[in-house]
Structures are given as structure tokens and as C-alpha cells.
Amino acid sequence: MALFSYQQRVFDDLREQQPVVLQAPTGAGVPVIARRPVGGYGPGVGGCPDGSNAGDKKEVYVAPGADKKSLLNEPLHGVEGQQVTIDHYSLPPAWIGGKHYHTGPVYVYVLEGAFTVDEQGKPRQTFKAGEVYPEPIGVPMQTRNISTSDPLQLLVIQITPKGEPLMYKAE
């Protein structure tokens, strides 16, 4: 499935107020979409790998050492209660972020450099300039710039419930 049609499907689902969970890519590299109720399935079977629900709020995470420029932060038109955020990040050489997770859809477009991701339970992945990384919802991850000489430039597009932080610290 082309990335555009995949993104369109996610936004269509949001417009219909049917939250989605982006699961790990299949063998063919095509992400799978699965629906779940807002806040997960109840205690012990939520959207997060540890069984917690997205509604079980934890410590808000802010990427240390990252230069973040907000380009857009406004209500998502046609989807009540949802916010769209577009941020530009500049990450210095050898930057390593903390472990965190997201409670809504996130798309990372690599503008310059190589973006490396360690997702819980998966091998390390690296995305180069011109590639998009659809971050999984509720999965703890750690990101980094593995270059020791070049900065990393990212465009991050995220959908969250209005007033909710963009990411939470993971253990």
C-alpha cells in the first residue's frame, strides 16, 4: 500500500472517530492497522506492551538536547478533540534520546542524516533522508543519531487528543 493511501486511511479512521493502533510492519514491510477502543481494552490488556492503557498517564517525556521548532499545533479539522502537531527537530551528532512512547499516530520524515530507532522487541532500524518512519502507538522506543559528525534533521507529524502531551517517558 502506498504511504499516501496508508496515511489517508489513518486520517479517515480518525475522522470517523475510530482510533487506530499502528502495529509492526508485516513481512512485506506494509504496516497493519488494527482498531481498539480509546484507552485500550481495559485493565491489563491495553494498547501498551506492558498491558497498561494509553489512559494510564505517566511522566511526560521531552527529548533532551534536541532543537525543536514548532511549525503547526492546532485542532485537526473535521476530527473533534484531536490535535495535529508538526515539528522540525535538529539533533546533534551522537545524540541519544530517552526511552519513550506515543499515544497517537506519529510519522517521522527524515530530512537529513540517518534516524535510528530501537523499538522494544524489534531489531534496530535506520531510516535515511527521504524515508518515513510510522512510529507504533504505545510501544516503548529509543531514538538516536548514530553519526558522530553530522546533525540529523526530522519533520515529525503527530496526532494526539487535545491537551495531551506528545510523548511519555517509558521505563
Image: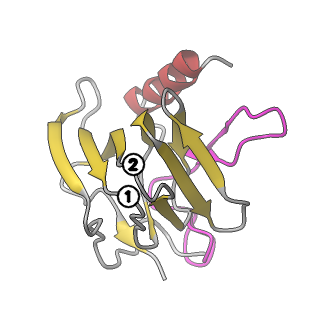
Q: Give the labeled residue for mark 2.
A: 150
Q: Position of residue 97 (x, y in %)?
A: 40, 67
Towards the viewer: 33 or 4: 4
Q: Position of residue 160 (x, y in %)?
A: 31, 48
Q: Which residues are magenta?
A: 21-50
Q: Is 53 on the left-hand or right-hand side of 65?
A: right
Q: Quadrant of the N terminus?
A: top right
Give the secondary structure at mark 2: loop
Q: Position of residue 37 (x, y in %)?
A: 52, 52
- Please check the rendered image and state whether residue 41 is part of the magenta-colored stretch, yes or no: yes
Vertically, is 21 above or below 15?
A: below
Among the 4 quarters of the image, the one containing residue 103: bottom left
Circle 1 packing at 10 Å, graded few (<14), some (14-19), many (20+), is: some
Q: Earlier in the sequence, mark 1 or mark 2?
A: 1
Q: Is 70 on the left-hand or right-hand side of 57?
A: left
Towards the viewer: 75 or 122: 122
Q: Give the labeled residue for mark 1.
A: 93
The answer to whether mark 1 and mark 2 are in CB contact below 8 A is yes
Kind of residue sitting beneath label 2: Asp
Give the secondary structure at mark 1: loop
Q: Position of residue 100 (x, y in %)?
A: 43, 68
Q: For the point 29% across and 31% down, which residue is it?
A: 79
